[in-house]
Amino acid sequence: MSDRTASHPGLVARTRERTLSVNVLAADFTPPSLDDFFPKAVLFQGTPFELDRVMLIRILMTLVLCLVMVVAFRAPKIIPRGLQNVAEIGVQFVREQIADEILGKESGKKFLPLLSTIFFAVLFMNLSSVIPGLNISPNARIGMPIVLAAVAYVAFVGVGIKKYGFFSFVRHSTVVPNVPAAMHVMLIPIEFLSTFILRPFTLTVRLMANMLAGHIMLVLFFSATSFFLLDADASWMKGLSPFSLLGGFAFTLFELLVIFLQAYVFTLLTAVYIGQSQHADSH
C-alpha cells in the first residue's frame, strides 16, 4: 500500500466500495448467449410437437407472409396500389434480378415460384429480428436454414438428375474435362465434396451465422443501454447510455441491410446452382 493510501483510510474505503459496486453490477448483468436461441418450451412440452418461443415466431412469420400475399393478390388490379404494389415489386425483383438474370427468361419463368418462395421466406423470417417483442430471427437457429437449404438442394440435384440421369449427372458434375488422368484421383473427390456436400452446408451456415451474430450484437447494445441507464450506480456510467443506444440504432439499420442481403444471396445461389445443374455437361 502506498504512503498516500495509508494516510487516507477514506480513500481505501471508497476504492473498495467502488470495486465492489462494479463487481456486483457486472454479476447482475446478463450478456447475450446461445441460451437465447434455445428458450424453454411454451406449448406441448415433452412431446414431439414441443414449441418454444423461436418456433412460435417461425409459425407467426409464416402466417404473416401468407396473409400478406393473400391480401396483396386476392383482387389484383391492372394498376397496382398499396400492398399489391409492394408485393409485385418484390416478385418483380426476384424475376428480373435473379431468375431471368441467372437462368434466362424461359427457365427463369419456370423456377420463379420456387425462387420467390425462398426469397420471401428468408426475408420475412429475418425481419422478426428487428420487430419489437420478437427480437430474434428463426433463421438464427439452424433448423430453418437446414430446411431452406434442403429445398434448394433437392431443386438443383433434381434438375440435374431429370435432365441427365443420376449417374450421368454425377459424372458431369465431378469429372473435369481436359485434365491429365492422374489428376482425376484428386479432382473427383474435391468436385463431389464441393457440389454435393459443401453447397447445402454453406447455404445453411451462411444464413444462420449472419442472423445469429446480428441478434447477439443487437441484444448487447440495447441491454447495455438498459444497464447503463437504469442499473448502474455510478453516475458516470449513465452517461454511456446514449452512446450504446446510438450504436444499437446504427446496428439496427445495418441489420435491415443484412436481412435483405441474406434473402437475396440465398435465392441467388439457389438459382446459380440450378443453372449449373442444367448445364452440367459444360463443366
Image (cartoon, rainbow, N blue to C red):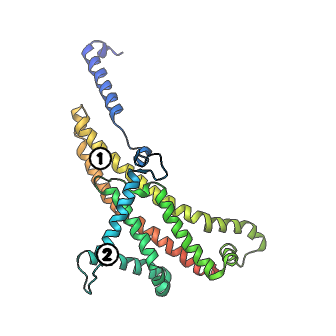
Query: Closer to the camera, 177 or 56?
Result: 56
Q: Which residue is drawn at 34% across and 75% down?
A: 90
SS class, disc 1: helix
Q: What amino acid does circle 1 point to?
A: Phe
Q: Which mark is residue 87?
A: 2
Q: Residue at x 56, y 74 (%)?
A: 156
In the image, what residue type sits under mark 2?
Ala
The image quadrant of residue 274 is bottom right
Q: Is residue 181 left or right of residue 246?
A: right
Q: Name the one closer to the observer, 57 or 210.
A: 57
- Please indicate whether residue 15 sits to the left or right of residue 211 in the image: left
Camera-side mark, 2 or 1: 2
Up the image or down, 118 lies above or below 202; here it is: below
Q: Quadrant of the C terminus?
A: bottom right
- Mark 2 vs mark 1, CA separation in Å: 32 Å
Q: In which quarter of the image is residue 92?
A: bottom left
The answer to whether any part of residue 8 appears in the image is: no
Residue at the spot of label 1: 222
Q: Which residue lies furthest to the right in this view?
A: 182
Give the quarter of the figure containing the N terminus. Answer: top left
